[in-house]
């Protein structure tokens, strides 16, 4: 193998890791032109097959990023009834009062860009790519042999925290695993987490006092998970806690859990665009209140099953979350936190364990940043099970080993993300009609996730990147399924 050819190929792979697919394509074309008989040609050919798909995929993500900002300038957020937010933005001269066509309150584009430029792109306590952990604060603890639904008490929380600490090799973000009862406060839970787990941790400070919130100030290894917007409008009960979190000096995880066809558009592009817009709005508010505060983009898109309930067993769940992570890491470089590794199953069964493993491996294969809910969660985030957590961690250890032993020169795997050129029209229609359920755009995209999945499965049949790492696509191919 020519040293020059190998150096060129490695430089192409490095450009892919920087998401410069145009540059990588030029490198691979140079190899094809000048090293036709070199053994590296076969690998080069395989990478060239993916370049146009990756270039097109990145173009769509760039449009999602741009359209997310256009939602804020052209459609606006429904904040007119919240005087506190209106006063904040009017004082900052952020509202575009000259816009007479917006559905809600529009922002000035230069103010949006100014605020987003203040958002740090580097996270001091960053655990790195493909970080998995707990999270979501499911309301109930699943106890073996006990069907009664209850929160965790002090003794149970102490056991959970110590157990999580034993799996620090695979649990790299310790996000609140379950709600607590009155025997232990949220602040005391945070103290337990601080004592036993040295890595990145997340809590939600809404239930803390003003004094207790200051515990997170200037701590690189903590993030405060908070939210403000849903369905293009602020949640009334979250405005004051959100602003307090912004002012506290803590790192922020800005959460948006919009669901396709329920609280956001039904197409993948439409869903990500609305979520992105809502998180960007939260970033704008955060930077208005506290310029330079670290904001993790916590856009967590959700999909539903046939009955309309949130479905973490769906193979679409890891796909859409991986795509959201790509918008952040490929385009705007925001620290990013997504969701995956859970299941709709309510009991600790073999099916529940396998579904979680397949979801994590799908996310790992496509490359993500931080993923919460990945260990121990059940019932589409309604339950946390310590038994399942341990099983998930044991399986995660095996998956990490397989992934780390795989060749590192495979490049980036395309996701063939489907475009929706009517996204902005659809979001405006949803805004005008008060939700996606009555929107024609939603009806036109009922099968969009299934078509996307079908495309991925068909392409994967021709080229499996990690055949030893069992994920949702490989599982369906092995069963002979196309659409589950």
Image (spheres, grey):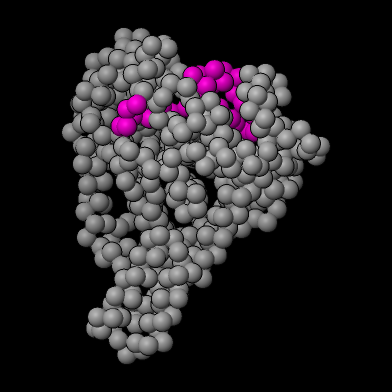
Name the quarter where the N terminus is drawn. Answer: bottom left
Q: Is residue 476 above or below residue 133?
A: below
Work out which residue is located at the far left of the displayed protein and give it. 166
Going by the image, does 193 lie left or right of 322?
left
- Across and down, in percent, residue 409 comes to 30, 67
- The quarter of the picture where residue 9 lies is bottom left
Q: Residue at x 21, y 37 (%)?
A: 168
In the foreground, 72 or 388: 72
- Across and down, in percent, residue 216 comes to 35, 23
The verdict on residue 205 being magenta is no
Q: Residue at x 30, y 81 (%)?
A: 5
Q: Is residue 379 above or below residue 397?
A: above
Q: Residue at x 39, y 49 (%)?
A: 368
- The quarter of the picture where residue 111 lies is top right
Q: Is residue 245 above or below residue 21?
A: above
In the foreground, 114 or 354: 114
Q: Is residue 193 above or below residue 466?
A: above
- Across and down, in percent, residue 305 comes to 54, 42
In the foreground, 264 or 288: 288
- The quarter of the picture where residue 15 lies is bottom left
Q: Which residues are magenta?
A: 218-244
Residue 18 visible somewhere in the drawing? yes
Going by the image, does 52 lie left or right of 405?
right
């Amino acid at each position: 193998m020519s040293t020059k050819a190998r150096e060129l190929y490695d430089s192409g792979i490095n450009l892919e890791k920087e998401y410069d697919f145009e540059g990588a394509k030029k490198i691979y074309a140079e190899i094809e032109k000048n090293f036709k008989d070199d053994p590296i040609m076969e690998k080069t050919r395989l990478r060239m097959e993916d370049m146009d798909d990756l270039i097109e995929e990145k173009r769509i993500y760039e449009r999602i990023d741009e359209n997310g900002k256009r939602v804020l300038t052209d459609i606006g957020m429904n904040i007119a009834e919240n005087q506190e937010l209106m006063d904040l933005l009017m004082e900052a001269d952020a509202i575009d009062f000259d816009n007479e066509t917006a559905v809600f309150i529009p922002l000035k584009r230069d103010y949006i860009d100014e605020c987003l430029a203040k958002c740090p792109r580097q996270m001091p306590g960053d655990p790195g790519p493909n970080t998995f952990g707990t999270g979501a604060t499911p309301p109930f603890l699943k106890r073996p042999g006990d069907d009664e639904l209850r929160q965790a008490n002090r003794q149970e929380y102490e056991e959970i925290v110590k157990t999580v600490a034993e799996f620090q090799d695979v649990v790299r973000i310790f996000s609140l695993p379950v709600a607590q009862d009155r025997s232990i406060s949220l602040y005391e839970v945070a103290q337990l987490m601080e004592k036993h787990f040295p890595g990145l941790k997340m809590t939600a400070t809404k239930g803390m006092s003003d004094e207790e919130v200051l515990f997170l100030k200037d701590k690189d290894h903590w993030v405060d998970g908070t939210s403000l917007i849903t369905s293009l409008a602020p949640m009334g009960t979250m405005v004051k806690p959100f602003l307090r979190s912004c002012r506290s000096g803590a790192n922020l995880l800005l959460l948006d859990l919009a669901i396709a066809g329920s609280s956001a558009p039904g197409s993948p592009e439409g869903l990500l665009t609305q979520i992105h817009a809502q998180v960007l709005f939260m970033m704008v508010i955060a930077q208005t209140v506290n310029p330079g505060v670290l904001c993790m983009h916590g856009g967590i898109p959700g999909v539903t099953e046939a009955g309309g309930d949130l479905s973490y067993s769906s193979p679409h769940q890891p796909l859409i979350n991986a795509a959201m992570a790509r918008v952040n890491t490929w385009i705007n470089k925001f620290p990013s936190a997504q969701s995956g590794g859970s299941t709709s199953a309510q009991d600790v069964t073999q099916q529940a364990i396998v579904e979680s493993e397949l979801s994590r491996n799908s996310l790992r294969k496509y490359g993500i940043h931080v993923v919460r809910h990945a260990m121990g969660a059940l019932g589409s985030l309604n339950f946390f099970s310590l038994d399942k957590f341990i099983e998930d961690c044991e399986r995660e250890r095996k998956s990490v080993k397989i992934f780390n032993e795989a060749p590192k020169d495979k490049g980036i795997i395309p996701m063939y993300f489907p475009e929706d050129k009517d996204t902005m029209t659809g979001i405006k229609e949803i805004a005008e009609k008060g939700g996606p359920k009555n929107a024609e755009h939603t009806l036109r995209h009922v099968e969009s996730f299934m078509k996307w999945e079908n495309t991925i499965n068909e392409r994967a049949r021709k080229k499996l990147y990690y055949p030893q790492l069992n994920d949702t696509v490989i599982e369906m191919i092995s069963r002979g399924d196309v659409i589950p």
